[in-house]
C-alpha cells in the first residue's frame, strides 16, 4: 500500500483526505491518505523520517510551509522563489519539495474562465500574505505586464515587489477601488469574507465587465465579493477550485497517476463545506 498524508498544526480542518480518498477509490489504487498532526517542535523529525515511516510523501499546510522549505533536500525554481513548500515527495532516498498552490490557482482559473488571457494584461491582487505569494508568482509566470498588490500594510506589498520585481506595483488599500478600471483579473487572497471573518468591503463600480473575479476563500463557497461581482455581470471563479487543482500534482507524484478534477469531486467537497449546496 502506498501511503501519503497531510501535516499541519492543527490539521483536523483539512479536506485533503476527502479529495485524495475520492481519487484513490475512483482509480482503484491500493493507497491511503490521512491527516497527521505535527507540532512545530516535531517537524524536522517527521520530515527526515518520512520514508522510514512508509510514506511516499505528504502535503504541508499552516504553519509549516516555510519551515519545510528549509528541511527538504531540494526544490524547483518556482518553489525557490516562494520559499514555501506545500508538497513533499521522495525520490532516490531524497526528500524533495515543491509548491502546487500557484498551478492550482491557474488551473482553477482556466477551468472556470477558459478564454481569459493574462499575457500583456493587468491584474489586481488583494493581500500580500503567504497565499498572495503563490498567486502573484503564478500570474507573473503567465506573462501579465503588471500586478497591483493592495494590502492594509503597504510594507508587505513592497516586499512582494522586492521579491518578484518591477512588474509588481504596491498600492494602498484605500486606493483599490480606483485601480480596478483596466484590470482583467481581480483576486482576493485575504481572509476577509471568510466564514467567521470580517466582510470584504470593496466598491466594484470601476471594474470592467470583461474582468474575471476570483477568491481563494472557499468557506463560504461563494463569498460576498463573488456575489457582488456576479450580480453586476462579471464572471467569477470560486476558491474551492484552487483547493482541488493544487492537489493534483501531489497525487501524481505519490501514486503515479494524474487524477482529474471532475464535477463529481467538486460537488462532494462542496457538500462537505455546505450540506445545502446545489448546482
Image: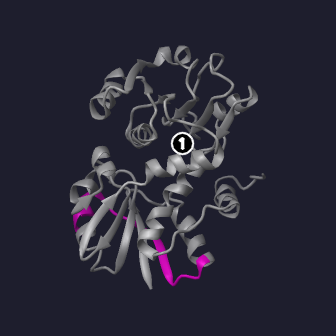
Q: Give the residue at mark 1.
A: 216
Name the residue rendered at 22%, 54% in the picture: 70
Query: Which secondary structure lies at badge 1?
Result: loop
Q: Nearer the viewer, residue 228 or 110?
A: 110
Numbered range of the magenta stretch: 27-45
Residue 133 coordinates in the image, percent (x, y): 38, 39
Residue 71 coordinates in the image, percent (x, y): 22, 59
Disc 1 crowd rating (10 Å Cα; few below 14, some 14-19, many 20+) is: many
Name the residue rendered at 74%, 25% in the picture: 232
Name the residue rendered at 59%, 22% in the picture: 202
Q: State the quadrant of the N terminus.
A: bottom left
- 164 within the magenta span: no
Up/down of 41 relative to 155, above or below: below
Q: Nearer the viewer, residue 60 or 99?
A: 99
Residue 260 coordinates in the image, percent (x, y): 59, 65
In the picture, measured across the screen, residue 275 lies left or right of residue 110, that is: right
Residue 199 coordinates in the image, percent (x, y): 58, 29
Up/down of 243 relative to 231, above or below: below
| Quarter of the rendering containing residue 95 | bottom left
Up/down of 118 relative to 49, above or below: above
| Quarter of the rendering containing residue 159 | top left
- Which residue is at the far right? 278
Q: Nearer the viewer, residue 278 or 135?
A: 135
In the picture, measured across the screen, residue 12 lies left or right of residue 228, that is: left
Name the residue rendered at 66%, 34% in the picture: 226
Amino acid at each position: 500500500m502506498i501511503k501519503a498524508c497531510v501535516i499541519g498544526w492543527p490539521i483536523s480542518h483539512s479536506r485533503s483526505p476527502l479529495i485524495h480518498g475520492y481519487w484513490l477509490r475512483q482509480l482503484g489504487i491500493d493507497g491511503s491518505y490521512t491527516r497527521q498532526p505535527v507540532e512545530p517542535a516535531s517537524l524536522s523529525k517527521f520530515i527526515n523520517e518520512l520514508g522510514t515511516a512508509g510514506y511516499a510523501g505528504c502535503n504541508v499546510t499552516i504553519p509549516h510551509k516555510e519551515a519545510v522549505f528549509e528541511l527538504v533536500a531540494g526544490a524547483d525554481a518556482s518553489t525557490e522563489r516562494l520559499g514555501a513548500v506545500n508538497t513533499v515527495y521522495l525520490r532516490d532516498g531524497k526528500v524533495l519539495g515543491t509548491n502546487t498552490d500557484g498551478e492550482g490557482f491557474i488551473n482553477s482559473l482556466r477551468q472556470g474562465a477558459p478564454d481569459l488571457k493574462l499575457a500583456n494584461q493587468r491584474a489586481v491582487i488583494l493581500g500580500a500574505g503567504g497565499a498572495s505569494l503563490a498567486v502573484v508568482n503564478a500570474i507573473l509566470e503567465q506573462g501579465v505586464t503588471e500586478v497591483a498588490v493592495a494590502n492594509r500594510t503597504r510594507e508587505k506589498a513592497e516586499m512582494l515587489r522586492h521579491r518578484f520585481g518591477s512588474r509588481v506595483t504596491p498600492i494602498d488599500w484605500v486606493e483599490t477601488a480606483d485601480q480596478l478600471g483596466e484590470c482583467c483579473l481581480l483576486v482576493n487572497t485575504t481572509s476577509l469574507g471568510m466564514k467567521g471573518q470580517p466582510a470584504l468591503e470593496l466598491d466594484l463600480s470601476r471594474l470592467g465587465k470583461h474582468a474575471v473575479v476570483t477568491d481563494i476563500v472557499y468557506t463560504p463557497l461563494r463569498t460576498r465579493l463573488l456575489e457582488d461581482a456576479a450580480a453586476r455581470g462579471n464572471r467569477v471563479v470560486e476558491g474551492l477550485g484552487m483547493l482541488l487543482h493544487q492537489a493534483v500534482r501531489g497525487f501524481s507524484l505519490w501514486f503515479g497517476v494524474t487524477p482529474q478534477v471532475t464535477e463529481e469531486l467538486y460537488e462532494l467537497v462542496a457538500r462537505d463545506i455546505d450540506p445545502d449546496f446545489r448546482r
